[in-house]
Each structure stands twice: as structure tokens, then as C-alpha cells.
Amino acid sequence: MPRFALISLGVILAIAVVVGLSATYTVSERESALVLRLGNPVAVINEPGDLEPGLHFKIPFVDDVLHFDKRNVEFNMAPAEILAADQERLVVDAFLRYRIVNPLRVYQTVRDERGLQQRLSAIMDDSLRGVIASIPSSEVISGQRAEVMNRIRLAAEAQVATQDIGIEVIDVRILRADLPQQITERVFERMRSERQQEAALIRAQGEERARQIRAEADREATVLLANARSEAETIRGDGDAQRTAIFADAYGQDADFFAFYRSMLAYDLALRDNTPIIISPDSEFFRYFENQAGEPD
């Protein structure tokens, strides 16, 4: 076979392969395909609700195919500073989960998934700002986070429905909502100052209460001691009265014996520990030393 014929056959086979590859395309069960003929959509393959995955044919060099993911897709929004109702700035990091339900509307409104991401960024930014601007920062940071996310999801769903971009919003979540770094430091310092003031107030109240308790205890102790002394004096007075009565009764029964007994007690107290006593020998104090009756000779 002449060389020219071989070259021609090779060229024809190459053209046939190129044309054959250009005339076919595959669609996964996880995606939909939009067929464009000279830029105009003519068919949607394996759209949600249909099962048409596999090999498909198109007109070579005339038809183009755009593929769209049928699965739930997560769109992560870049962190943004948003002003809350109390004029506090918050750094909010959120994401949205969505699913493409109408590839044709997606193409007609935003062309492709890159354009869809840009549109979702604007929708999320507007929804976040609209909701967070109506509530104080405390509720976003540590308050009713679930309620806030639900309100943002409803706002995003409303915009998606109004713009009819061919998607369904599944969920909206706030990953992080904090104060900016410079504001966080100021808030931390303010919180620490407030806690120190609270601690000082509590400490002062505790010390005042301690002083009150000590004063009440001292007052009660003073009253108890006074009552105890009064009762002791009363008991002592009663004892002295009883003793006096007993002495008087004893004296009345036997005056001589009582006088003798009183002298013995006086000797016992006066003559202890070899204590020297200087006294006249004829003193009444020693009358019982002279005779047993204690009478002068």
C-alpha cells in the first residue's frame, strides 16, 4: 500500500476518533448534565427525580455539556465583620448547605456553579447582616444560637425563592461568632475589671458581716457573763444568808459552844505556817488557853 494511502487512512481514523469522542459524554449518578447547542440549553440529563446516568450522545462541535452536582453541597462563607443591634462588631463564620434541583434555572440565572457560589455569597452576607443587626451580640455569641441560625436559614430561603436560582437551601450553620481581636482584648479587660470590683464588693460585704457576727458574739458573751455573775452573786448571797442563819441558829442553841467554835477558827487562821503573833498575854484572844471555859481566873 502506498505511503500516502497509509497516511490518509491514519488521518481519517484520527478524525473518526476525535469525532466519536466529541459525540459522547458520560453522566454520573451523582450529577446532572445540561446540554447546550450553540449556547442554548436543549436538554437536561439525569436531573433530580430522574435516573439517566451513563453514556449519552451529542452533536460533535455543536453541543456542549455542563455538569452540576446533585448531592448536598456545602458553601463556606468567608468570615465577615457584622454589626449587631447593640453596635458591637462580630466576626461571623458561617456555611450553607444546598442542593441543585433545577440545573436549567441555575444556568439561566448564574450560568455555572462558580456563578452560583458568588450569588450564594451575596445571599448569605445579606441574610447574616439582616438577622444579626436585629439582635444583641450576646445572643449571637452565647445566647439562642439555634434560633438565630433558623432565622438566617429562613431569610436565605426567602431570597433563594425570590430569585429562583434553581437550588434548595437545606441548612445554615454558624461555625464561629466572636468579637474582633482588638475588641476582645478590651472586653476581656472590662470583664476582668468588673469581676475585680464584684470580688472587692463581696469581700467588703463579707468583712462587714464578719464584724457584725463578731460584735453579736461579743455582745452575747458579755450578756452571758453578766447573767452568770449575777446568778453567781445571787447564789453566793443565798449561801451567805443560809450560813448566817445556821450560825445564828447554832449560837441560839449554845452560845458558849459557838464562841468556842469561832475562837478555834480564828486560831486556825492566825497561827498558820509558824506566823509570829505579838499580843498581850491577858488578851481575850487567848482566853481558851487559860481554861477550858474561856473565863478569866
Image (cartoon, rainbow, N blue to C red):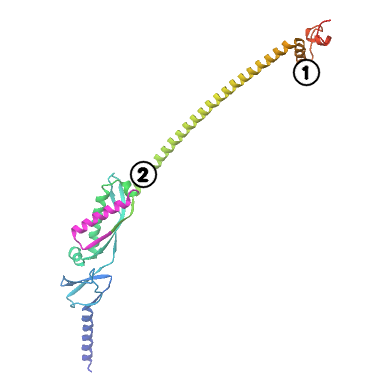
Q: Is residue 100 left or right of residue 188?
A: left
Q: Which residue is mark 2?
A: 187
Indicate the position of residue 76 as horizontal and vertical percent values. Answer: 30, 59
Q: Is residue 241 magenta?
A: no
* Quarter of the rendering occupied by the N terminus: bottom left
Q: Image quadrant of residue 256?
A: top right
Label 1: state its secondary structure. helix
Magenta residues?
Answer: 142-170
Q: Nearer the viewer, residue 234 or 278?
A: 234
Q: Nearer the viewer, residue 141 or 161?
A: 161
Q: Image quadrant of residue 102?
A: bottom left
Magenta region, mostly helix, strand or loop? Answer: helix
Q: Which residue occupies the extreme bottom position in the image?
A: 1
Circle nearer the N terminus (1, 2): 2
- Relative to 235, is 16 above or below? below
Q: Is residue 213 left or right of residue 161?
A: right
Amino acid type at mark 2: Val
Q: Nearer the viewer, mark 1 or mark 2?
A: 1
- Relative to 217, is 197 above or below? below
- Relative to 6, is 186 above or below? above
- Around disc 2, counting alpha carbons within 10 Å, would you say few (fewer than 14), some (14 to 19), or many (20 or more)? few
Q: Which residue is mark 1?
A: 272
Amino acid type at mark 1: Arg
Q: Is residue 104 left or right of residue 132?
A: left
Indicate the position of residue 59 as horizontal and vertical percent values. Answer: 17, 77
